[in-house]
């Protein structure tokens, strides 16, 4: 069986360094808010090219804290609107509604699967305060037009960078293109912890300071609480593990690109729609999404042939029960993607034999 993703193989690749890092934390006797957090945050900021990294418990919290901090700092208030792609993972939407803000769903481009820059301006109102872009599947969602719209209407640009560690736009890393970015280090991400973990990156010192307090019960000074916060801290073990993997991330991203290039050049089945790659620097292939009208049959066929797959995602946010007030809304491009997308194996530990086998089986479908 060719797994969709083998986290064990990925971890084994750096096993000795990870064991050393874990032992260092255990022996230190200091397990929260210590030198491992400080080192990872410093190294990640340097890698991204930003001033501040604030570690937190997970990627959802990272996005929640960004919007919450903008409210605490007086930039947003209940009922304000945030423009967001309709075809994102639901966490992006939850982060907005959790803060009593209103998501304004915008269709993606069928060519890029990213928010359609040409549909944004018509959705901007007096209550719009931000555009939240999602670098879905590992592809850059930022465009110069989106940046211009933010300047024209004085909007914050928030990045959901959960799937795009290492992606670039004109040499600038995603996570440093907007005003703030949320990062997930869920184990399956390009930069994955051995558990849940997340971070916010920003060049805004006031925002970073506020988020650091919010994620520490609302406290910047022990037993002094400026905000009603929560406990959402990156622990020392995960920080140490992430720092190990960060130093191999550029190499791992290149390996992903090598797999993607082979797929693009060799999958020839006319029933399969491959992702369109406009700039290889603007994609880090967290996932390799293909589309097929007979998606469910294709998935069953691949399973029968020993190839693991996944669907990202079978039900779009506006059709979920938790957002039933939107269930009547028609978003045909989003719905087409969700009905036809299938993710095939993609990781930096795949063998040439596995990659060739996947292509062969898909071409015979």
Image: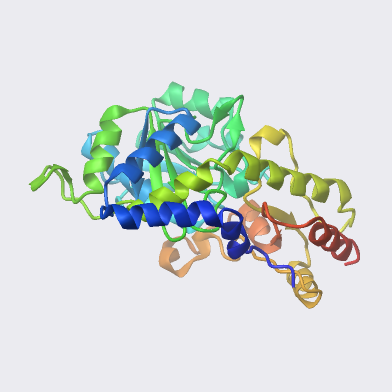
The reply to whether residue 201 is visible in this rendering is yes
Q: Quadrant of residue 211?
A: top left
Residue 164: x and y in percent read: 56, 43
192 on left or right of 171: left
Q: Using the image as rendered, state which of residue 296 and residue 354 is in the foreground.
A: 354
> Along the horizontal axis of the image, is 210 left or right of 135?
left
Q: Nearer the viewer, residue 205 or 247?
A: 247
Q: Quadrant of the N terminus?
A: bottom right
Res 66 visible: no
Percent position of residue 182, x then y:
42, 44
x and y percentages locating residue 221 in the rendered image:
12, 41
- Quarter holding the C terminus is bottom right
In the rendered image, the vertical position of residue 20 relative to residue 246, given as above or below: below
For residue 238, what is the image quadrant? bottom left
Image-based side of 312 in relation to 71, left or right? right
Q: How is the image coloured?
A: rainbow
Rendered position, 311 above or below 264? below
- In the image, 363 versus 234, the foreground residue is 234
Q: Residue furthest bottom?
A: 304
Residue drawn at x 49%, y 46% as measured from the top left: 244
Report the residue at 37% width, 42% height from top: 81
Q: Which residue is at a point 73% across and 71% down the rendered structure image?
A: 296
Query: How many numbered marks, from 0 up?
Result: 0
Residue 22, horizontal then vertical, whole percent: 41, 56
């Amino acid at each position: 069986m060719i797994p969709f993703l083998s986290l064990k193989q990925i971890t084994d690749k750096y096993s000795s360094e990870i064991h050393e890092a874990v032992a260092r934390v255990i022996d230190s006797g200091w397990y929260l808010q210590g030198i491992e957090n400080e080192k990872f945050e410093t190294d990640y900021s340097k890698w991204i090219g930003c001033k501040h990294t604030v570690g937190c418990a997970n990627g959802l919290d990272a996005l929640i804290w960004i919007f919450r901090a903008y409210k605490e700092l007086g930039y947003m208030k209940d009922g304000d609107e945030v423009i967001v792609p309709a075809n994102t993972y639901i966490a992006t939407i939850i982060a907005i509604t959790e803060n009593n803000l209103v998501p304004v769903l915008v269709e993606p481009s069928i060519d890029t699967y990213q928010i359609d820059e040409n549909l944004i301006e018509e959705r901007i109102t007096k209550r719009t305060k931000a555009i939240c872009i999602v670098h879905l599947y590992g592809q850059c969602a930022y465009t110069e037009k989106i940046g211009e719209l933010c300047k024209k209407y004085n909007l914050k640009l928030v990045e959901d960078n959960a799937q795009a560690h290492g992606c670039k736009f004109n040499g600038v890393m995603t996570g440093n293109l907007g005003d703030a970015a949320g990062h997930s280090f869920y184990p399956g991400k390009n930069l994955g912890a051995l558990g849940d973990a997340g971070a916010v990156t920003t060049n805004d010192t006031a925002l970073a300071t506020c988020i650091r307090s919010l994620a520490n019960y609302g406290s910047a000074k022990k037993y002094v609480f400026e905000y009603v916060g929560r406990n959402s801290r990156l622990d020392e073990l995960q920080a140490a593990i992430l720092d190990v993997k960060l130093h191999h991330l550029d190499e791992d991203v290149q390996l992903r690109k090598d797999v993607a290039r082979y797929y693009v050049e060799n999958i020839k089945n006319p029933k399969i729609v491959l992702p369109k790659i406009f700039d290889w620097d603007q994609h880090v292939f967290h996932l390799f999404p293909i589309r097929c009208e007979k998606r469910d049959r294709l998935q069953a066929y691949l399973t029968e042939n020993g190839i693991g797959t996944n669907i990202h995602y079978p039900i779009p946010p506006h059709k979920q029960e938790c957002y039933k007030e939107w269930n009547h809304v028609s978003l045909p491009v989003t719905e087409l993607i969700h009905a036809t997308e299938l993710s095939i194996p993609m990781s930096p530990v795949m063998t040439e034999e596995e990659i060739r086998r996947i292509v062969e089986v898909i071409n015979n479908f």
